[in-house]
Image: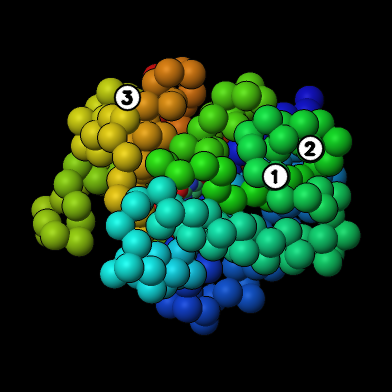
Amino acid sequence: MSHRYVVALGGSLLRPEESAERDTWFARLRQLVVSLEGNGHRLAVVVGGGLPAREGIQLASSMVSDSARLDRIGIAATRINATVIQQVLQSVGCDVADAIPHTVEEAANLLSQHSIVLMGGTTPGHTTDTVAVRLAASIQAKYCIIATNVSHVFNKDPREFDDAEAISEMTLAELGEITGVGSPLEPGASAVVDPMAVQAAMDASIDMAVLDGRDISRLDDALEGKSFVGTLIRT
Ligand code: UTP
């Protein structure tokens, strides 16, 4: 049976810190996508802005106070990163849409014509996590996978607290208690899951998975519906 999947791929995965592992990571990502396509599945990947988003926003921030303007810089960066992955996958012959859609509706439409669609952000006021959740709702995907650079959702910030505990399974309401619900982040700010995405998932009853996208086998497990190392978030 053919499935539709949505993955939010954190722009952090493309940052220079990950460069030592990049070739292996891209090779494993290509393998995964080729295998999904070969099995007749459809995959939308919503790529985050990572370093170019932060740098661009930082460059303008002393002169621009309107957060929607700074968000637009972030969105441009997400589209650059989406184009990088798009070109890598097209170069190995995958059926990837040529267009990088600007809206969730356009992405859903392209996904009915191609096995794979890459996109970035859409409009100001949220991050690519939110775009991914909205797209998952629009195409009736089983759930929305957030592939990022942390292993799980933690009960508190593991960068600040040594005793932070990784959570394997939780409800969306519990996630909302950690991240907040429905309040936009500052342009370029980072959080394990965007509170706007938590709101969107609650509104559309979309389950989520948060996992470390540096290890493609975790993504593979989650896509296959197997148990995976990461956090499963149920509605
Ligand atoms: P990201 O989606 O990359 O933020 O958007 P993120 O999830 O925190 O970070 P990484 O890169 O995946 O680790 C970067 C910025 O682009 C703007 C926001 O300013 C956001 O902080 N953005 C992105 C939007 O305004 N709308 C969008 O749909 C996407």
Q: Earlier in the sequence, mark 1 or mark 3?
A: 1
The quarter in which the C terminus is drawn is top left
- Name the one closer to the observer, 73 or 212: 73
Which residue matches tag 3? 171
Residue 225 location in percent, x, y? 58, 33
Which residue matches tag 1? 101
Which residue matches tag 2? 110
Q: Quadrant of residue 126?
A: top left
Residue 11 location in percent, x, y? 49, 60
Q: Quadrant of residue 184?
A: top left
Q: Is residue 80 left or right of residue 208?
A: right
Residue 171 location in percent, x, y? 32, 24
Residue located 29% across and 69% down the image? 62
Residue 19 in view here: yes
Foreground tag (1 vs 2): 1
Q: Earlier in the sequence, mark 1 or mark 2?
A: 1
Q: Earlier in the sequence, mark 2 or mark 3?
A: 2
Residue 209 in view here: no
